[in-house]
Amino acid sequence: MTSPRWYSPRRRTIQLKQSTDAEVQEYITDRYSQYQSVMYNIQRRTDTLMMVGRQIGRAQYAFFTGQRQTIAPLLLRDIAQKLQISESTVSRAINDKYIETDQGVFPLKDFFSRYSGGDESTDQSVDQMVAALKAIVAGETPGQPLSDEQIAQALTARGYQVARRTVAKYRQENHLPSSAQRRRNAKLKG
């Protein structure tokens, strides 16, 4: 019985490099060049992801530290401009990536939210406006629910510039019943 021979990729590579065959030398040079290119691109991807992550951390600092329950408004464009890269690069960098925080594990995409009312001069996000909408609905008098127009006025008083249609849209998206349905529900409970 013969003893097993161990295969060593490093030894085999050294043997191939010492080869005088031009075709083998060309093959090794080509593969090494490809290897360097792949390693460079992996490092660039890692660097980009780290830079984007730092920007998200800065923008959402209040959320991460528990000072705020909802995320601040943040667009892909905001990060792209700060890092001087394209929005599509930011989008590809965060796609299918997650972050572990004290509040749990989140997809990086969850930290991007539009500005409320489309006005970038405000520091209020759609998520914050929806949280305020839910609070208004939860705090209304059971037998006398507010209409979408009244909710829009209440949100305007809190600094959110929204129309009645916008209130209706976010109310429906968040499975909050209409004022008529809330009134019926209150009668059934009462």
Image (tube, rainbow, N blue to C red):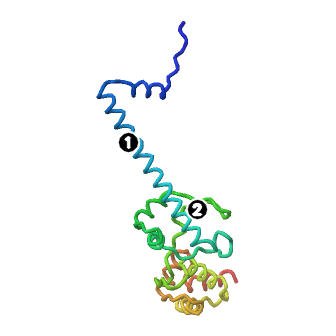
At label 1, which amino acid type do we have?
Gln
User: What secondary structure is marked by label 2?
Assistant: strand
Asked which quadrant contains residue 64, the reply is bottom right
Q: Nearer the viewer, mark 1 or mark 2?
A: 1
Is disc 1 surrounded by few (<14), some (14 to 19) or many (20+) residues within 10 Å? few
Q: Residue at x 50, y 87 (%)?
A: 162
Horizontal relation, residue 95 to residue 134: left or right = left
Going 58% across and 73% down the picture, which residue do you hit? 71
Alpha-carbon neighbours of circle 2 within 10 Å: few (<14), some, or many (≥20)?
A: few
Q: Nearer the viewer, residue 42 or 131?
A: 42
**Which mark is drawn over residue 181?**
none
Q: Residue at x 44, y 25 (%)?
A: 12
- Badge count: 2
Residue at 55% of width from left, 61% of height from top?
107
* x then y, percent, for residue 84: 43, 68
**Which quadrant would residue 16 be assigned to in this image?**
top left
Residue 182 in the image: x percent, y percent?
60, 83
Residue furthest to the top in view is 1
User: Could you tell me how far apart the alpha carbons at marks 1 and 2 are, in whole angstroms?
Assistant: 34 Å
Q: Secondary structure at mark 1?
A: helix
Write down the residue under mark 1. Answer: 34
Identity of the amino acid at label 2?
Phe
Check the image and name the residue furthest to the right.
190
Quarter of the image with the C terminus is bottom right
Quarter of the image where the N terminus is located: top right
Q: Which mark is first along the chain, 2 or 1?
A: 1
- Are the two marked residues, 1 and 2, in contact with CB atoms closer than 8 angstroms? no
Is residue 142 shown left or right of residue 121?
right
The residue labelled by disc 2 is 106
